[in-house]
Image: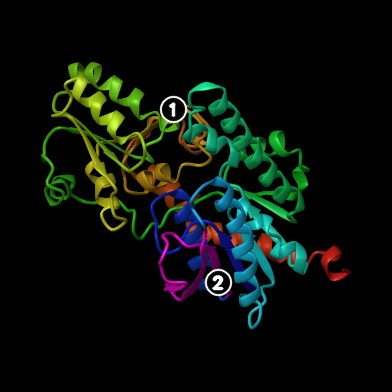
């Protein structure tokens, strides 16, 4: 198959779950013998229009970021231009769309190429958890209009797609409730973990030494976008109580986002500078060692956990996970009979057996074949 992945994030720049899913799908489908290309928004103005990543060609379209209106309309206009250039010499058999706005431009609908939409989280819900209404009636109106616009955009895309991919049963239910599509069009394809990268280590002390961490003591680790829905403020609030029970406690928080200054201020006010460290962005190459160095990975999500790739990455690294009963976390940890997961063979077996990117891409391939070979398409 010739497969086009349509997105707003980059295969080459992995900074969160959306990028990781796109990256693994692109490389995984290519490894299965398919011809794969990615069409996506340019990450930063002035970046190259074409990049190669693991044998995958990523084609980027520019956007005007001056305001919300220019961003919206430049996305629709420029993706149509990029699409016209792409299909001069390469026409995909199927489009796997990762975000709603670029899909709204309609390259699949206008060309009769089937579209499979990947819904990692609802667009309007993601916006609402990352933004506040602001002060006054103007801010409230703008907030509501922005949320409704994202809901309408995604609903338009969802209802026109041939199939919908979700990573969890939690997200399947959210899509059904929000967009009122038929359940028969939704396929659940769980996320995965690269078990060659995220695997248990023999000596935690040596890993800590590599990272410049104290070899003794009890380390809690989490890696999240620093936004309200991640529950990081609540986690920091719990540390004074935990310090009374756990000697040598250290909380490491990886990730970037708009809450960084607020979290730093909270740490200072609580007098936790010695035992809570905000690490900022952790490069992919170093992330497995942080999982291995920790005694416990904490997923303190307050709202909207569509799957939680970090959960299975931690388990694959041999580190137990404590998560809140939000979103899909219960689905993953529930298979292990509890939200506190012991180290050992069981955790490794879960990560490698049920949640691998190879299995994810195999199931995704089956959905794409189903769409391409459907009777309605053959008779069209």
Q: Is mark 2 on a helix, strand or loop?
A: strand
Magenta stretch in the rendered image: 34-63
Residue drawn at (76%, 42%), measured in percent from left and top? 181
For label 1, the crowd category at 10 Å Cα-Cα, with few meaning under 14, some 14 to 19 and many 20 or more, is: some
Rendered view: 142 above or below 13:
above
Residue drawn at (47%, 31%), measured in percent from left and top? 337
- Disc 1 designates what residue? 324
Whichever of labels 2 and 1 marks the residue nearer the N terminus, that label is 2
- Residue at the right extreme, as displayed: 379
Seen from the viewer's position, the closer of residues 88 and 343 is 88
- Disc 2 designates what residue? 37
Q: Is residue 122 in view?
A: no
The stretch drawn in magenta includes residue 8: no
**Marks 2/1: CA–CA distance:** 37 Å
Q: Pick the quarter of the image with the C terminus.
A: bottom right
93 left or right of 255 in image:
right
For label 2, the crowd category at 10 Å Cα-Cα, with few meaning under 14, some 14 to 19 and many 20 or more, is: many
Specify how the rendered protein is coloured: rainbow
Residue 280: percent from left, percent from top:
27, 44
Seen from the viewer's position, the closer of residues 162 and 338 is 162
Rendered view: 224 above or below 12:
above
Residue 336, image quadrant: top left
Residue 340: percent from left, percent from top:
38, 30
Q: Nearer the viewer, mark 2 or mark 1?
A: 2
The label shown at residue 308 is none
């Amino acid at each position: 198959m010739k497969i086009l992945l349509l997105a707003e994030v980059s295969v080459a720049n992995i900074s969160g779950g959306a990028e990781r899913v796109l990256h693994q799908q692109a490389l995984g489908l290519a490894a299965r013998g398919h011809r794969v290309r990615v069409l996506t928004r340019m990450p930063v103005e002035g970046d190259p229009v074409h990049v190669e990543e693991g044998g995958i060609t990523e084609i980027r379209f520019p956007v005007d970021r001056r305001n919300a209106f220019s961003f919206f309309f430049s996305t629709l206009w420029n993706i149509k231009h990029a699409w016209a250039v792409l299909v001069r010499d390469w026409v995909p058999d199927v489009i796997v769309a990762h975000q709603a706005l670029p899909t709204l431009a309609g390259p699949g609908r206008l060309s009769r190429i089937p579209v499979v939409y990947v819904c990692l989280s609802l667009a309007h819900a993601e916006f609402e958890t990352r933004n506040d209404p602001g002060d006054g009636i103007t801010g409230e109106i703008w907030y509501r209009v922005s949320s409704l616009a994202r809901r309408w955009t995604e609903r338009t895309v969802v209802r026109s797609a041939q199939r919908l991919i979700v990573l969890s049963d939690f997200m399947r239910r959210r899509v059904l409730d929000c967009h009122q599509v038929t359940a028969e069009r939704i396929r659940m394809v769980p996320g995965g973990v690269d078990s060659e990268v995220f695997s248990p280590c023999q000596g935690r002390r040596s890993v800590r030494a590599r990272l410049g961490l104290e070899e003794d003591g009890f380390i809690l680790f989490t890696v999240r976008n620093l936004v309200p829905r991640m529950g990081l403020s609540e986690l920091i609030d719990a540390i004074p109580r935990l310090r009374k029970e756990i000697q040598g406690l250290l909380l490491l928080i990886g990730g970037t986002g708009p809450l960084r200054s607020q979290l730093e201020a909270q740490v200072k006010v609580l007098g936790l500078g010695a035992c809570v460290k905000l690490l900022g962005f952790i490069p992919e190459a170093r992330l497995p060692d942080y999982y291995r160095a920790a005694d416990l990975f904490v997923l303190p999500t307050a709202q909207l956990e569509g799957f939680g790739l970090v959960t299975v990455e931690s388990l694959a690294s041999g580190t137990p996970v404590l998560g809140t009963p939000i979103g899909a976390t219960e689905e993953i940890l529930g298979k292990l009979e509890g939200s506190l997961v012991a180290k050992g063979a069981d955790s490794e077996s879960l990560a490698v057996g049920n949640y691998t990117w190879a299995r994810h891409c195999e199931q995704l391939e089956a959905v794409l074949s189903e769409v391409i070979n459907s009777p309605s398409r053959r008779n069209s």
